[in-house]
Amino acid sequence: MADWSSLPADLVNRIAERLLATDDLDYYMDLRAVCRGWRSSTADPKSRPRDTRFRPRQWAMLDEVHQSDARLFVNAGTGRFVRRDLPLLRRYNIVASAAGGLVVLAERSAPHAARVLNPFTGGMISFVAPVPCLYDPAVHVIGSLQTGLGEERHSDNRAGQRGEVE
């Protein structure tokens, strides 16, 4: 049986670069987890949070259910689904999911400092400015909404109550 940990570093690195080129960050992180040799042969995304190779490009977070720390992501290019456990969500509130699959977070306690989390690498970028108006339990949708049936409705949706707006 082959000892996979003894693969040449340049071969491991070439495989890793192909995974990054196809936006398979989850596979890249799995590859790095195989053994110490493979980790040392590849770039550490946590030490390079601004490196664009480690930014998800085609991923979207599908659910924001707050019952667990896991979130479901889909790769729009391949249709592949991945559920990621994000234990950091115990300490932060999700503000939004951003382009490519990044997640905007805010500290739970004031002044609610903003963070951007890469859910695939665990890398996080911190911002000095706090998130304004962190949490409003009511949902506010004001304006024109498409119903999907070719008609346009005008609504003011607050905290689950629907009303027509003239």
Image: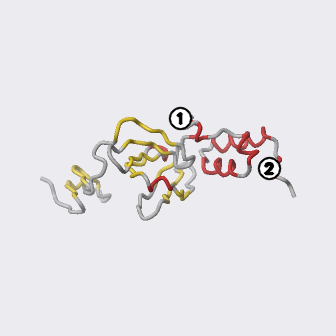
Question: Looking at the image, is mark 1 or mark 2 earlier in the sequence?
Answer: 2
| Total count of labels | 2
- The residue where tag 2 is placed is 5
Separation (CA) of disc 1 from disc 2? 29 Å
Check disc 1 and report its element: helix, strand or loop. loop
In the image, residue 21 lies at what x, y percent? 63, 40
In the image, residue 93 lies at what x, y percent? 39, 52
Residue that extends furthest to the left in the rendered view of this protein? 166
Q: Which mark, residue 50? A: 1
Image quadrant holding the N terminus, namely: bottom right
Label 1: how many residues lie within 10 Å, few (<14), some (14-19) or many (20+)? Answer: few
Residue that extends furthest to the bottom in the rendered view of this protein? 67
Q: Which mark, residue 124? A: none
Which image quadrant for residue 129? top left
Residue that extends furthest to the right in the rendered view of this protein? 1
Under mark 1, the amino acid is Arg
Label 2: how many residues lie within 10 Å, few (<14), some (14-19) or many (20+)? Answer: few
Name the residue located 41 percent from the left edge and 61 percent from the top edge.
65
Check disc 2 and report its element: helix, strand or loop. helix
From the viewer's perspective, is residue 110 above or below residue 69?
above
Side of 67 where 86 appears, left or right? right
Which image quadrant for residue 154? bottom left
In the image, residue 24 lies at what x, y percent? 61, 48
